[in-house]
Image (cartoon, rainbow, N blue to C red):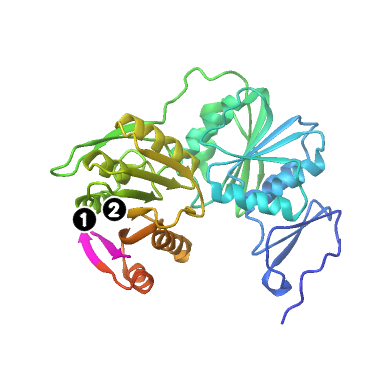
Amino acid sequence: MGKKISCRHLSDMHIVITDRENESLVKEEVFLGNRYRVVSRSGLNVTEAQVVEVLKGLANPKRILFIENRTGVCGMVAKDLHPEAEVTIHCLDLYYANKIKRNLARNEASAVTICCRPYVEQKDIFDVIFLQLSKGGAARELTLDLMQQIHQALHMGGKCFFSIEGNDSWVRNQVEKLFGGSSVYSQSKIGCCIAAKKKEKLKRIRDFQAEFVMTIFGKKPVRLLTIPGVFSHREVDQGALALAEVAGGESQKGDAVLDMGCGCGAIGISIGVNQDVSRICFVDSNSRAVYITEKNCQLNGLERYEVVMSDIGIEEECGFTLFTGNPPYFSHYKISELFISTAYKALKPGGRAFIVAKTAAWHYKFMNAMFGNAELINRRGYEIIKSVK
């Protein structure tokens, strides 16, 4: 048995961002000399460690914004170093917003503002903005979108820092184009931090929104808007199309539909446009997905629907007759477990659940154990598992 984490203060500020209590299962790091001691599961990502180093050199900032931060450590350090500054952490996904809120509460750090919105709405007000770019994180078009939002949110002369895992020359090239120059603030074998300053307003604001039509044989077409960061941008995902075909083909008049992990809303909207359902509930943890699904529902004339932002499913029990889910392919099936558990809780007896996966062995086994039955349907190179409650 390892020792429990003690509360000894080896540094000026002690930050804990893990619920693990065993010292052998956590990593302890010290930053800015001995000023900050951070205890986490596996250590801060290099993108956040680089930001911490930048914070000490800021000269009396009034407003600081962090984007794509996932722990809250930067916000706590910023508020400690610059107590008079307004510190905001902007999240696109509610999962990370809630995670940061828990970390702030654990460390009794209440002076940092957390928001979860599809866009940075403020214009020309921030002194400093940080964007963290981890490997496997934001796709390139989302990165470009966020860069443009950062430029608009900075006041004239404001600074921004792009903290990168690895040394991606593409990022620096894009910063150069957008800001008219950049510099390398820091660089190592595992990451670098690029700095830039807002010198003038943008001459052209790029629109990253796309529109396409989803068609299913024998069904009414669906118009869909998408934006970067929403699954899937600029084209119909074949897994989603397969799920819409199968679940839509088995939908019935009067169905109450729950579309979980809705993305741009393609599956639920396709069912709603082609079937006289009683209602549709769209659920996603991503603020951009919720935003664009609402627009797509209006675009396609849906009336009996609601769009919910949640990272824990929904609380309603036995209120639906049809469930569709396209869980992301990561997190060691934890998200898939949430989807399937929510389906079982939310469906009425006799309700049908449809889950799509590239390889369905795990999902088939889990759904069969939970529902007592499972059927495998192959479509478009994907496997759809159907269970009946």
**Boundaries of the magenta span:** 376-389
Q: In which quadrant of the rendered image does the C terminus lie?
A: bottom left
Residue annotated with mark 1: 380
In the image, is 305 to the left or to the right of 63? left
- Against 156, residue 365 (above or below) is below
- Against 297, residue 254 (above or below) is below
Q: Name which residue type carries label 1.
A: Arg
In the image, is 275 to the left or to the right of 100? left
Residue annotated with mark 2: 239
Q: Separation of disc 1 and disc 2 at Cα?
A: 7 Å
Q: Looking at the image, do the residues carrying marks 1 and 2 touch, with CB atoms under 8 Å apart?
A: yes
Query: In the depicted view, which residue is nearer to us: 186 or 321?
Result: 321
What percent of the width, then of the height, locates residue 111?
A: 76, 41
Query: In the depicted view, which residue is nearer to us: 168 or 114?
Result: 114
In the image, is 327 to the left or to the right of 192? left
What percent of the width, then of the height, locates residue 49?
A: 68, 51
- Which residue is at 83% across, 64% downward? 7
